[in-house]
Image (spheres, coloured by chain):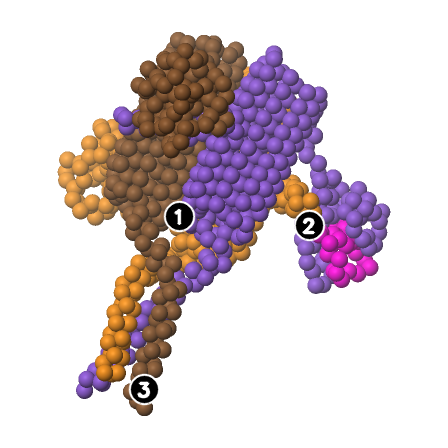
Chain colours: A orange, B purple, C brown
Amino acid sequence: MKTSEIAELVGGELHGDGQVEILSCASADAADAGQIAFVEKSDTTPESKASCLLVPVDTPVNDSQTVIKTTRPKLAFARVAAKLHPPKPRPAEIHPSAVIAPSATIGSKVFVGAFVCVGENSTIGDGAHLRAGAKVGDNVTVGEGSVLHVNVFVDDDCTIGARVILHSGVVIGADGFGYVREESGGYIKFPQIGTVVIEDDVEIGANTCIDRGALGVTRIGEGTKIDNLVQVGHNVDIGRRCVIAAQTGISGSVTIEDDCVIGGQVGFGDHVRVQSGAVIGSQAGVLPGKIVRPGVWWGTPIQPLEDFKRQNAHVKGIERLKSEVRELKKRLDDTISELKS
Amino acid sequence: MKTSEIAELVGGELHGDGQVEILSCASADAADAGQIAFVEKSDTTPESKASCLLVPVDTPVNDSQTVIKTTRPKLAFARVAAKLHPPKPRPAEIHPSAVIAPSATIGSKVFVGAFVCVGENSTIGDGAHLRAGAKVGDNVTVGEGSVLHVNVFVDDDCTIGARVILHSGVVIGADGFGYVREESGGYIKFPQIGTVVIEDDVEIGANTCIDRGALGVTRIGEGTKIDNLVQVGHNVDIGRRCVIAAQTGISGSVTIEDDCVIGGQVGFGDHVRVQSGAVIGSQAGVLPGKIVRPGVWWGTPIQPLEDFKRQNAHVKGIERLKSEVRELKKRLDDTISELKS
Amino acid sequence: MKTSEIAELVGGELHGDGQVEILSCASADAADAGQIAFVEKSDTTPESKASCLLVPVDTPVNDSQTVIKTTRPKLAFARVAAKLHPPKPRPAEIHPSAVIAPSATIGSKVFVGAFVCVGENSTIGDGAHLRAGAKVGDNVTVGEGSVLHVNVFVDDDCTIGARVILHSGVVIGADGFGYVREESGGYIKFPQIGTVVIEDDVEIGANTCIDRGALGVTRIGEGTKIDNLVQVGHNVDIGRRCVIAAQTGISGSVTIEDDCVIGGQVGFGDHVRVQSGAVIGSQAGVLPGKIVRPGVWWGTPIQPLEDFKRQNAHVKGIERLKSEVRELKKRLDDTISELKS
């Protein structure tokens, strides 16, 4: 792409040469000729060997640099990267080792790698990629343009939307964790016969598990992004455009409404409801049944960030409080003994 | 099943029509004709479109409903579900792509999916299912009726009991995490040459890892249920009928006795012993070597739940305590200056 | 091995018969004839059925035992075990089901199991093992003698050093978790086009995920050992000879310098720097951008272990402090009312 085309793509203001050919993206410090980079904030002329820099509108620049000024350089950079580094193309072919049920429907321009399985009555949408070892059970739908990376598994009756990315080792639709204790002390399985619905434009990180509903549906809403090694229990309902960082665990029947941001290693007890727009810090713990209102939350059990900070300061202050009490006691002792003398 | 048969199966008291044909299970609010649902507690006549409801014995019902009264409706429901929704049947066949060692023994009515491997001298019990991509090393025993879901791996010399369910991505028998520091500062592997024994009726969730013993055995006792993404270290010994929720991590040589309940994201230091019947809350942390007595435990480091709650209340009260101390100080100052005047 | 050879190997002092043939390793309590065991500390003559014991230099022994005295018996034991229990040998053969790109280079004495894939332009070093279902993308290098266990996946452009062990289900090179919010409220992917470099002698536990760099490199330094179910984010840089226990999560752009020891379930915010030699306790939480100096750290947010212990003691002391304040108040009240009377 020429720098002038990039300026147009991102709606930015070009300073310098519009004819420079940009081949790839890099970070500002590692970039070289032919590359584009971005700077989020700079009081001085940014230094970089990049052939073009995306910079904030108020950045001082000099004549020797080719820069594009834009209100949000990082966003602009991501958009340029999407053009310069599109997802890896793979040929429209079905590897001869793949095992595809006769009743399955494979769309056009689908890539099916080695050792892939597609079960009975499943449908793979146009342009989808099923990489080597990916496996799809029976009655599964995979939407257009979705990518199932290596060794992904989507079990029976689950639905994957369009342009979904499932990273390696993801397991969709394993049984949820539900048992009923018997008189004998042993456990009998509560039925785990529901399904999973992953809506369009969701991305799910490596080795993350999304369990099927016990009786209903586990749903991941449109445009939500989930990191690696996350646990999503049965009947969880996650809204649209949520972001959930690595190793967070979400117990059964939790609802997370639209536009929430959840840190890493957060734990949710069952039947929690997180209201739209809430932000929960990493390693927080949310007790079962809790309703989490919009705002920023922290700690175990979670509290508003400001309360959490104040409480932490108080805890750190106990030592001083202790010596204040000791001092008071001494003064009171002295006063009383003076009075008595 | 007819409603009269269901009443007999669960030992409940049928009110209404005993000839209604029930085809499947559902939740009370989503159920429709032909379905059975359950209600755990209701002061009024429960509303549901289900053709039959399992309800507690004291539930008010009306003549138009077919209900079965039983002391534990949820347990009854699970038992009905086990009949109406048995595990997916799979044909007794070995997929031609499977790679089975000549010295392996495959029982009768075994299902072996595509891309399965079974190693030398391994034995697969009657009625077991090895789904696509499941792999079993050398000298492994898989008991009767066990199900290894997609991409499960059981490494050499491990033993899987009867009716065990291993969900997708489970890894049984990887090396434990043990090293000895050398004079050079580097680490040399402590031998990880033990095995894993999974007893009958165990269920293990997706992507959970059970490491082999360093020198001895890692054991999961009969009827124990383990959720997704759990880590079980080398030489851990877990008793019978334990329940362990997602993302909990159990360090080497921990013993968990029978009938314990462990929440999600709990961390155990090594050589902990959890005594029979203990309950440990989610996100708790148990220091190495700790003996956890029966009772309910919470927090990091764990303490009895009551202590934990009281301490939490105290922490929340520091702010007030602080102002009380300030007030005391002022009054003492005033008293002293009055005395001096 | 004869006991005299073992004494020589570990540089220890042999007491007893040097001609005893040792076949395998065991723990002192489980050992039997033909086995060697070790004792880390003993005030009395250790009891064991082992044919030879590795013991500390000051251990009292009797004439009937064959022992080898050495300064570090556990280290000596690990060295003996490395000889007696070498990694499982596998034949130099390529399973006919493996799918190897024509442009890939397979070294000598390489084992390639069933259902393995090796992508275009990838190189597998001499003596490497790719076990069943392991998959290697395009332009990947796997060094000499490395072992990729069952179902491991190494994605395009990543580099694996020599003698590396990747346990089952490991995912190397999945996309990192980076997005930029758009005006619409949705998220666009920040480019994840970097790579992963795993240096020599690294061992990585089952189902652990190492994401590729966004624009640069995610690096695991020489001799570092990582346990199961660990998350390593994009652009993380881990030094040499680090030890990281299970379920720890390391956010993007964290640097962990050489010789650090990290417990299990620790969480790192992004851009943390852990300085060489630091030790971080299990379940600790490190806030974004923190610089962790050498020493022992604990808690969330982390503090020096001594501070953490003192603070914990203070928190436990709040209840007493409260009653002291109440007592003071009463005494002051009494004093004031006496004065007034």
Residue B70 visible in image: yes
Residue in front for this viewpoint, C322 or A268: C322
- Say whether residue C107 is left or right of residue A12: right
Residue A263 visible in image: no
Is A314 above or below relative to B333?
Answer: above
Gap in angstroms between the C-alphas marked 2 and 3: 67 Å
Is C93 above or below relative to A171?
Answer: above
Q: How far from the left and from the top, in percent, is residue A101?
A: 63, 24
Residue under pointer 3: C338
Q: Quadrant of the C terminus of chain B?
A: bottom left
Q: How far from the left and from the top, in percent, is residue C203?
A: 38, 26
Residue under pointer 1: A282
Part of the protein shown in magenta: B49-73
Residue under pointer 2: B74
Q: Secondary structure at mark 3?
A: helix
As drawn, which residue projects farthest toward the front?
Answer: C63
Three-letter amino acid code at the position of disc 3 = Glu
Three-letter amino acid code at the position of disc 1 = Ser
Q: How far from the left and from the top, in percent, is residue C252?
A: 34, 39
Measuring 33% from the left and 36% from the top, which residue is drawn there?
A: C261
Q: Is the residue at mark 1 from the same chain as the one at mark 2?
A: no
At label 1, counting other C-alpha atoms closer than 10 Å, the crowd grade (few under 14, some 14-19, many 20 or more) is: many
Measuring 60% from the left and 39% from the top, which residue is drawn there?
A: B240
Gap in angstroms between the C-alphas marked 1 and 3: 55 Å
Task: Write down the chain letter for disc 1.
Answer: A
Measuring 29% from the left and 49% from the top, which residue is drawn there?
A: C306
